[in-house]
């Protein structure tokens, strides 16, 4: 049936989902706004293999009119974005494995990992890039683990040459990513079906070599990824993919919670994994604290410069995300001390199972290790800039 837009306008805190793993303990990470079922990982003895594939909108018979999906309007920073409404009970085959998972959980590793929800770190990333007036023009952009694809849509609207939206599930791309692209850009469904489209949609597992083949060996000027660090097991795959896909002078922005209580991922674990890479280096460039959930961080990852260019590369890195001096600065605020490098031993320990065990203890407890503390101004919008 034809679907029409709604006139509801939501703030980010009202519309987004926050990880709230139902593990029967008090280690909650904030409420899961509007989510159904438990955030606890679903059990599966033999999870079905996710197929890597290119995705396009389904063909519409010529006699039918292609209608716009129903949507909410979200205020993200200074921007209003339309977000497609999705109800798996109406839009998925209820006998499918994915529909059965969604009745119980928003996470089953390597089968479904939350792509139908709008996660708050995607909103952090959009807010940051827009605030920094990041230069997307003529760049190739990869929205990695895109879900609703809000950062990639920002890139499309800001003149990116090519944007690739990648998610684990083709169903996510069909039911929320494509509708959001149609709602927020001048791109049409026919445009997405063209072989030379400037918008790609690719489904697949990061560990699947076929996914890399579908990328066509292309290197990306900017990789955007958000809320993709919740599982410790996925972090090495993410780093290996960045090593393969990032262009020599490109940069990757990773927006994530400092700790994902109840499942084990963390920004500290990503920094540790990057520190073992011979090709990459990374640093926390922004801390978001809205007082409603766990601290969230933004990490910038670039390639290590050759030894002869190490100093020059460091100077460029200090100039900010777009190579513009002072682009990481924020308006003066109340000085505060923010710990962006604390290491929780449980956050680094790789569990034997496919899903990390719960983290216990205070998020600011460094288990006796030395902390590197940074004095930064408070961002009135909820973030601080690490320097």
Image (tube, helix red, strand yellow):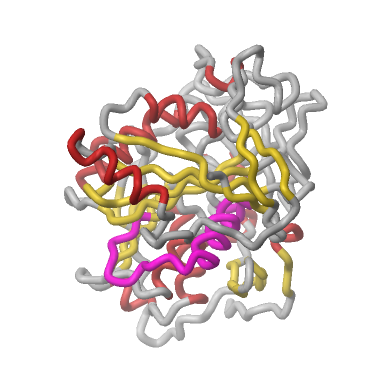
Q: Is residue 364 left or right of residue 121?
A: right
Position of the N terminus, as image quadrant, is bottom right
Is residue 115 one of those drawn in magenta?
A: no
Residue pictured at 44% horizontal, 49% vertical: 253
Magenta stretch, residue numbers: 116-142
Return the residue nearer the eye: 211 or 313. 313
Return the residue nearer the eye: 74 or 348. 348
338 relative to 261, above or below: below
Residue pictured at 32% horizontal, 72% vertical: 137
Residue pictured at 48% horizontal, 61% vertical: 327
Image quadrant where residue 81 sits: bottom right
382 relative to 234, above or below: below
Across and down, in percent, residue 269 comes to: 50, 27
Q: Is residue 359 left or right of residue 107?
A: right
Across and down, in percent, residue 32 comes to: 73, 46
Is residue 139 one of those drawn in magenta?
A: yes
Q: Is residue 155 left or right of residue 11?
A: left
Across and down, in percent, residue 366 comes to: 65, 19
149 relative to 242, above or below: below
């Amino acid at each position: 049936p034809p679907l029409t837009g709604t006139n509801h306008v939501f703030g980010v805190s009202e519309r987004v989902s926050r990880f709230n793993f139902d593990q029967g303990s008090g280690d909650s990470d904030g409420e899961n706004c509007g989510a159904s079922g438990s955030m606890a990982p679903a059990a599966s003895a033999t999870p079905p293999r996710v197929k890597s594939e290119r995705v396009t909108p389904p063909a519409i018979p010529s006699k039918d009119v292609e209608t716009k999906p129903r949507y909410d309007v979200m205020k993200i920073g200074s921007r209003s974005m339309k977000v497609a409404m999705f109800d798996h009970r109406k839009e998925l085959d209820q006998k499918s494995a994915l529909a059965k998972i969604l009745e119980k959980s928003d996470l089953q590793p390597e089968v479904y990992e939350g792509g139908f929800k709008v996660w708050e770190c995607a909103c952090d990333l959009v807010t940051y890039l827009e605030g920094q007036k990041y230069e997307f023009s003529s760049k190739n952009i990869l929205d990695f683990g895109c879900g609703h694809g809000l950062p990639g849509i920002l890139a499309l609207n800001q003149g990116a040459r090519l944007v690739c939206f990648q998610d684990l599930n083709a169903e996510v791309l069909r039911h929320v990513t494509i509708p959001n692209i149609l709602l927020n850009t001048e791109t049409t469904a026919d445009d997405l079906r063209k072989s030379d489209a400037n918008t790609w949609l690719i489904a697949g597992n990061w560990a699947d070599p076929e996914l890399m083949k579908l990328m066509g060996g292309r290197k990306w000027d900017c990789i955007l990824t958000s809320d993709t660090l919740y599982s410790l097991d996925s972090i090495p795959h993410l780093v290996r993919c960045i090593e393969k896909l990032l262009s020599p002078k490109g940069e990757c922005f990773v927006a994530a919670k400092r700790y994902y209580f109840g499942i084990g991922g963390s920004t500290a674990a990503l920094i540790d994994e990057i520190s073992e890479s011979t090709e990459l280096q990374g640093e926390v460039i922004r801390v978001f604290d809205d007082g409603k959930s766990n601290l969230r961080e933004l990490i910038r990852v670039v390639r290590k410069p050759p030894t002869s260019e190490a100093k020059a590369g460091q100077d460029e890195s200090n100039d900010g995300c777009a190579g513009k001096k002072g682009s990481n600065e924020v308006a003066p605020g109340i000085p505060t001390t923010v710990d962006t490098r604390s290491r929780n031993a449980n956050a680094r320990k790789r569990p034997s199972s496919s899903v990390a065990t719960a983290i216990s203890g205070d998020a600011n407890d460094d288990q006796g290790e030395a902390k590197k503390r940074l004095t930064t101004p408070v961002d009135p919008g909820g973030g601080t800039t690490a320097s």
